[in-house]
Amino acid sequence: MEIKSYNKSPAFTALYVNSRGAEKLLKKADRAVKASRDAIYLDMNIPEGHRLPLWSVLSEQIRLRQQHNKNDIVVDVFEKNKQLISIKTFDKKGFLQQSWIVNPMPAVGSMEEVMPAGTLIIGTKPSGQIKYGRSAFFDAMDSAEAAVDLLYSKDTAEFRPYIPSHREQPKVRRRNKTAGQINRQEQKSAKKYQNSVCNRRHVQRPFIVLKDLLIELLRSAKTQTKKLQPKSKAKLPRNLKKELKKNSGKTN
């Protein structure tokens, strides 16, 4: 695929004739169709209420049907000498999707000349006496419009409505509906706390009494134990110690 850059007309979005030469060829084809108005055209996509495959009529119908479609049908000259034009479809991003090369001039003649070989013909009308017409350009435009309709259906299927997050919403300050009123829930919680405190004291009372009893026993045991007194040793005077040493030496 390739990206095609072209000058888009601001008047419409779904159909665009890209060159002046293509417009001249389409007008010339319309004049040829009007000149053969006695022919019975076999194109199945002629707009309702019309009998001839005129580009001036079909273009307005396509623009009306595709006014909300962002995908484009671009008509341009392919080879001017052979009177060939190109029909291309582009998605909304500008990528080429499909292309057709056709001659916009109508084919007029007998049934065998207009219809391809092997086509099933219903009815017994003499084909030599009736003049038929066919436009390959109208068939290609019908295919191009079906292609952009398919692209549009895919775009709408992929589209998901935007749901803003709650974080993007402005913060609204909550109004205190119970201001100045008695809150029953707070009263219940306060009463429940009081009951739990009372229950805790009732459960811990025997252990508190036991604790006090143990403390008293420890204190009484401390009072009963006697403190160790330091050893008292009688000391002799110094002169007596000397005499005692002298006497002990003489005896030895």
Image (cartoon, rainbow, N blue to C red):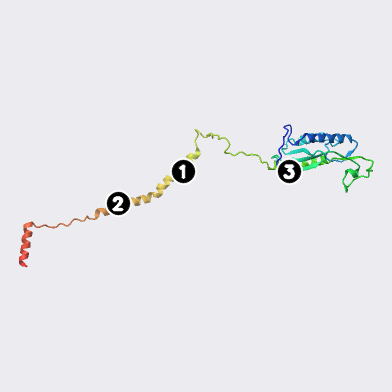
Residue pushed farthest bottom?
252
- Asked if residue 49 shows in the view, the reply is no
Q: Nearer the viewer, residue 124 or 169?
A: 124
Q: Do the residues labelled 3 and 1 touch (CB within 8 Å)?
A: no
Judged by depth in the image, the label closer to the viewer, 2 or 3, is: 3
Q: Do the residues labelled 2 and 3 touch (CB within 8 Å)?
A: no
> In the shown orientation, is residue 241 left or right of residue 117?
left
Residue under the point 50% across and 40% down = 185
Q: Residue 97 carries which label?
A: 3
Which comes sooner in the sequence, label 2 or label 3? 3
Residue under the point 27% across and 54% down = 221
Image spot of residue 174 (x, y percent) = 54, 35
Residue 251 lies, with reference to residue 159, above or below; the image says below
Q: Nearer the viewer, residue 22 or 46?
A: 22
Q: Please give the residue where the numbered disc 1 appears in the rendered image.
A: 192
Q: Quadrant of the C terminus?
A: bottom left
Image quadrant in which you'd find residue 74: top right
Q: Please give the residue where the numbered disc 2 appears in the rendered image.
A: 216
Image spot of residue 196 (x, y percent) = 44, 45
CA gap, disc 1 and disc 2: 36 Å
Identity, as a three-letter code, of the amino acid under mark 1: Lys
Circle 1 Cα neighbour tier, 10 Å, few/some/many (<14 / 14–19 / ≥20): few
Which comes sooner in the sequence, label 3 or label 1? 3
